[in-house]
Amino acid sequence: MKFDELDKKMRIFETSHDHCVLPGLNIAARIDGRCFTRLTKEVHKFEAPYDCAFRDYMVETVKHLMNCGFRVIYGYTQSDEISLLFHPEENSFQRKLRKFNSVLAGEASAKFSLLLGDVAAFDCRISQLPSQETVADYFRWRNEDAHRNALNSHCYWILRKAGKTPGEASEYLLDMSVADKNEFLFRQGINFNELPVWQKRGIGIYWEKYEKEGYNPISCESVTATRNQLKVDSELPMKDDYTEFIRNMLRKTLKAC
């Protein structure tokens, strides 16, 4: 069998189940660390529940993903996860899901591994969101999850550092309400409301314009050019204000299309 015939025959098995995101649907990717609890708490022993070096590694990984060939308009990270919102007209790989999932997981794994100096792996899943409102809901969901995780994590690690096993700490918190957990922290000298916003609400990364001074060698004049750069926002708004923040970002993007 000639190579061209063999290639045509075998390529079917590779592409027969290809699925593509339909035009008009918004694409959001969620990229999660694989086995990161062991990696960050046992192997590398980052500070629990939050570590500034780990936070910075995640931010740099998001920035890399926003510069690796896709049109990403917003990146968000909390804990060991990353969410990316793609430009509505993003058409890389003809919007094939397997390509988005594999490339994004690979890029995130490679970048974080280089930063860490050890092997780290991420997985990826794609959400196909039918409207601007569901996009806002998606990021509100991850923002609220960050808040819940922060409260639980601070309580959990206080118990762990007090000598309780993972199972004992989890069981202790199982039936506690949000108010009970806040009171528990307060008795330990921690006012949850005064903790850094990035711990409770995650970090947003998005493009902003800035003016750059230059020189035109033809006219021998100074000129000002407009450029884009990534802004890291560790003071994100919360609740309805955050939803409106995402809506405004989408409106600006669509207006520029």
Image: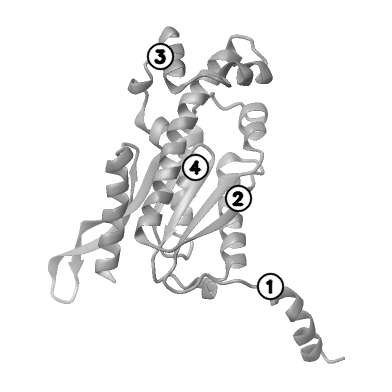
Question: Is residue 172 found left or right of 197 in the rendered image?
Answer: right
Name the N-terminal-most of marks 2 and 3.
Answer: 2
Image position, residue 24 (x, y; %): 41, 71
Local packing at callout 2 (Cα closer than 10 Å; few below 14, some 14-19, many 20+) is many
Name the N-terminal-most of marks 3 and 4.
Answer: 4
> Distance from label 2 to label 1 (Cα)?
25 Å
Numbered disc in front, either 2 or 3:
3
> Distance from label 3 to label 4 (Cα)?
25 Å
Numbered disc in front, either 3 or 4:
3
**For residue 212, what is the image quadrant?**
bottom left
Image position, residue 184 (x, y; %): 46, 12
Name the N-terminal-most of marks 3 and 1.
Answer: 1
As drawn, 71 above or below 11: above
Local packing at callout 4 (Cα closer than 10 Å; few below 14, some 14-19, many 20+) is many
> Distance from label 1 to label 4 (Cα)?
32 Å
Look at mark 4 in the image and give the residue it sits on: 58
Numbered disc in front, either 3 or 1:
1
Question: Is residue 76 found left or right of 228 in the rendered image?
Answer: right
| Outermost residue to the right | 1
Residue beneath the point at 47% across and 53% down: 64
Name the N-terminal-most of marks 2 and 1.
Answer: 1
